[in-house]
Amino acid sequence: MGFRSMLQRSKVRDFEEAVLPPGTPQASRLVFRSLGTTVNVARGHLIEPLDGAERQIIFISHGTVKLVGHVGADREQIVAFAFDGELLVLSVGTQTPYELYAVTDCQLLIFSAGKLFRAAAVSGPAATAILDRALLAIDRSREKSVLLGRKTAKERMATFLVSLSDRIGEPLGETISMTLPMSRRDIADSLGLTIETVSRQLTELRECKVVDTCGRSEITILDVTRLRDIAGTGAAFGSSGSI
Amino acid sequence: MGFRSMLQRSKVRDFEEAVLPPGTPQASRLVFRSLGTTVNVARGHLIEPLDGAERQIIFISHGTVKLVGHVGADREQIVAFAFDGELLVLSVGTQTPYELYAVTDCQLLIFSAGKLFRAAAVSGPAATAILDRALLAIDRSREKSVLLGRKTAKERMATFLVSLSDRIGEPLGETISMTLPMSRRDIADSLGLTIETVSRQLTELRECKVVDTCGRSEITILDVTRLRDIAGTGAAFGSSGSI
DNA sequence: CGAGTATTTGATCCTGATCAAGAACAGTGG
DNA sequence: CCACTGTTCTTGATCAGGATCAAATACTCG
């Protein structure tokens, strides 16, 4: 089936290579290998936490996952996407219930957070590497709060595209191309908007030649500078315009 | 002045007591003591990162601080509050610029994140304790994303009060009282609303006898269950009503 | 008690949600 | 390779929650 062939077609990331610092001793590597559980999940499926009530750390060997928070029955908010080679923290028993879903077919490596930390603590640099990832997750989540709390629909869309291009884009000269792994609904659920608004914003960006799309999931950023300006990220004095 | 007397009036938390696990060896404790820089800041003032471009971990010995993210010149979003005894991660050089402000007069203990982790890595349990705090920060930040992305003004206000009561409330029988350390503007900037909307929501909650206020900053939660229901937190089937 | 700021309340406006078709796409089987 | 079908996406019309603008009121602190 398509699932297996896809996994073979493109690269599967290696946890040790992607996360552990180069000097990690062989003994620690073996410990990490023994702690992680490899899981394959087909797109659209829920990823169940391994055992009972414990925080887990999930390494994405291949594919894209989304972490979804729920408000009541029908409203949902995607709290994080994670792509190939990234780590994701999955807490259980939090105030709002969260669920992890496979956005594309994917291969994961699941750890108990406690065990992983105890193993990492043995080798200082490994602990620091994992902590650093955790702090990166905090930064990303805070960016998201700013986006959700204070940005307009247009700014959200632009911010999303800029951030995605940093994570999964393929530079092609002045432009950046990427294949969106997620649907419009996923984008909307991530940006706190509706699919209709996402669609409209994308249309407007296409009309002002900032991006170009081909089919549902191919997108090319034509004017990176302009898109960053719209995203309202960083530079208070945009590169296109004042001074 | 009022500053000093306030510090004396109520308790100042101890980093070792609040963060480090009980069994932490004396040698490690001494290392931590040598790493932290104590700083006093008067309310309203900006808290400057200590040295140059490095991530810092800040322990709040006493008082309340807010971490503010900016979009353009005039829009701001409070990404986190931190109260007595809590830890806060301050990243520098992120996409959006963040600033840390003292909401009340406060006393802080500032660490370089790198140095703190390296010290913590020596004693496994200490590393785990700090990592645990980092994961808690991720959980809080994700809750905030759900709130900002999908909750209504009323739900946000209720969620805010519930969360605050968990962190700084004083239970009095069936009710919970607290002194809000922050202004309406701060609440609005934290909830992604305007001060007017915050004020109106508070008025409505007062009118339906869910809370009671006295002056600007004294607030009592009269009906905790009801408030949690409104917050839309957890229980899909609220305790007041269906089954 | 008075001055200045913070908060509340009221009236109107606007962005993005909702409701409703219609068009484009992907996957299937002939 | 193409027609068929169900889904996803786009576009249009209307609606509503919260923002904005404007003023009155209540605190706090000297």
Image: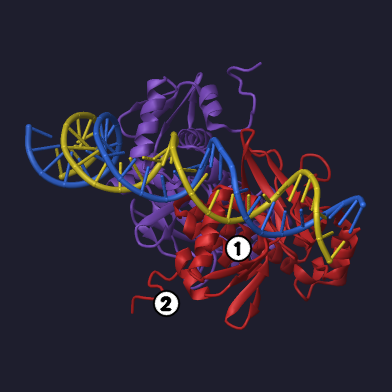
Chain colours: A red, B purple, C blue, D yellow
- Tag shown at residue A239: 2
Compared across the picture, whether A151 is left or right of B16 comes to: left
Compared across the picture, whether A206 is left or right of A219 comes to: left
Expressed as whole percent of the image width and height from the top left, the position of residue B143 reads 58, 44
Instruction: Kindly tell me whether residue B11 is visible in this rendering.
Output: no
- Tag shown at residue B116: 1
Secondary element at image label 1: helix
Compared across the picture, whether A105 is left or right of C3 comes to: right
- Between the C-alphas of marks 1 and 2, the distance is 38 Å
Residue A61 quadrant = bottom right
| Neighbour tally class for label 2: few under 14, some 14-19, many 20 plus, Cα within 10 Å | few
Chain letter for mark 1, please.
B
Work out which residue is located at the far bottom of the displayed protein and give it: A173
Chain letter for mark 2, please.
A
Q: Residue at x 56, y 67 (%)?
A: A162
Expressed as whole percent of the image width and height from the top left, the position of residue A58 reads 76, 55
Residue B7 quadrant = top left
- Residue type pointed to by label 2: Ser
> With respect to residue A208, does B219 lie above or below?
above
- Residue type pointed to by label 1: Leu
Q: Residue at x 64, y 78 (%)?
A: A171
Which quarter of the image is occupied by the C terminus of chain B? top right
| Neighbour tally class for label 1: few under 14, some 14-19, many 20 plus, Cα within 10 Å | some
Instruction: Kindly tell me whether residue A25 is visible in this rendering.
Output: yes
In the image shown, does B163 or B233 lie closer to the viewer?
A: B233
